[in-house]
Amino acid sequence: MISPTKVNVTSLLLREQPFPYSDKVFKFQPGSLSLSPAKALQHCHINLTTYASHIPGGNHLLASVSHHHKLLYKTIPKSSSSTGRIVMSHYLQGTDRRTSRDEFTNWTLHKGYDLISFIREPLDRFYSQYEEAFYRIGPWMGDKEMTPPKMNQWYEANKHKVLDRYPYLYEGMESMTDYRRLYCPRELLEGYKEHKCDEVPSIDVNGTLARRFEKFVRDYDGLHPWDVHLNLQVSHLVFGISGDPLPMTRLYNGSDVTREWRSIAHAKGVEINDGDIPRGRQRPRRFNVDLISDGTKRKICNMMALDYCCLNIKLPTVCEVAEEGNTDANNVFCKMRELDGRVTIESWW
């Protein structure tokens, strides 16, 4: 493959100029397109075989729908989704419902509805994805007296996917208290204030949880998530049957969720006072991110390559640098090619 050096990549994608190479394929850096994330997404191609475990089946997707304000909000787990659903419900007359492809298309293309969502920097999001999925499949979920029946049933049906392949994740843990001993200050545990454990900085100073996280990243292929919270962001922004992108109006930055939602509401004629928007489930990181190696971070960026490429997100610096003596293999690139008469974005993976 030939990597272009003096080619306007955006112009090629938009077919404003022909492909200059006979093989019709080349690679480019994530975040280098002169397009918004929503516009870049419209050119994304997802291989439904490769990413089958990420993409929900069926032709209906969960969204919050406000007919009064002609607004559709597509949730993406671990991308400010809890805050979004609160705002839609409390301020914008939104209701969660399963929405079909025809409805999405009709409302956005013919009736003037806005279809929005929030996205997040993929490396940072992966830390949250892992912690959510770790919690949801922990041994404590087998306690029928403490766990809601549906969650307990889900745990019993899925625990083998994790415990068989990553047995080290829960070594020495049988209860939530065992887990909390690794990240919660002793004075809270001994003072019967365990409910405060997720409100204070972690004490994973010796890196027990960080080391287990690194082992998981080493062994995880990125293609077989056991929990929806580990899915790629892009997988929530396509139709499950075809893999075609949803007709998004705009994708907002989840790092400034409060300001963005106030702006969205204002555009719909609804004023939300500063401080009135509650943040969703927020908690300090449980494992010590400072102990995570650069090699692990690069592996995560590679696993999240489709998000970086299809959402036109610039890579963190650590993922732009190859390991010494290896100029290509540990970098993340996007692929552009002609496919079925159109130019598409894919990950180089």
Image (cartoon, rainbow, N blue to C red):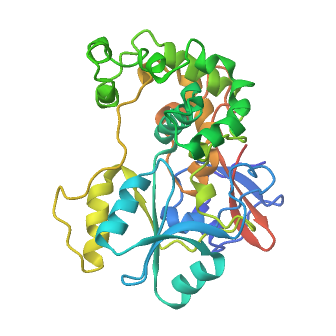
Q: Which residue is the extreme one toward the bottom?
A: 110
Residue 305 found in image quarter: top right
Q: Residue 59: horizontal and vertical position, in percent? A: 70, 70
Q: Which of 320 and 99 is in front in this view?
A: 99
Q: Which residue is the extreme one toward the top?
A: 206
Q: Is residue 6 visible?
A: no
Q: Residue at x 73, y 33 (%)?
A: 161
Q: Residue 249: horizontal and vertical position, in percent? A: 48, 74
Q: Residue at x 37, y 84 (%)?
A: 68
Q: Can residue 281 be seen in this view?
A: yes
Q: Residue 6: horizontal and vertical position, in percent? A: 61, 55
The quadrant of the picture occupied by the C terminus is top right
The reply, left or right, for residue 284 in relation to residue 120 is left
Q: Nearer the viewer, residue 188 or 283?
A: 188
Figure label count? 0
Q: Nearer the viewer, residue 147 or 253?
A: 147
Q: Residue 124: horizontal and vertical position, in percent? A: 46, 38
The reply, left or right, for residue 319 in relation to residue 124 is right
Residue 240, relative to residue 4: is it above or below? below
Residue 282, relative to residue 262: is it above or below? above
Residue 217, relative to residue 251: is it above or below? above
Q: Residue at x 61, y 23 (%)?
A: 323
The reply, left or right, for residue 114 in relation to residue 17 is left
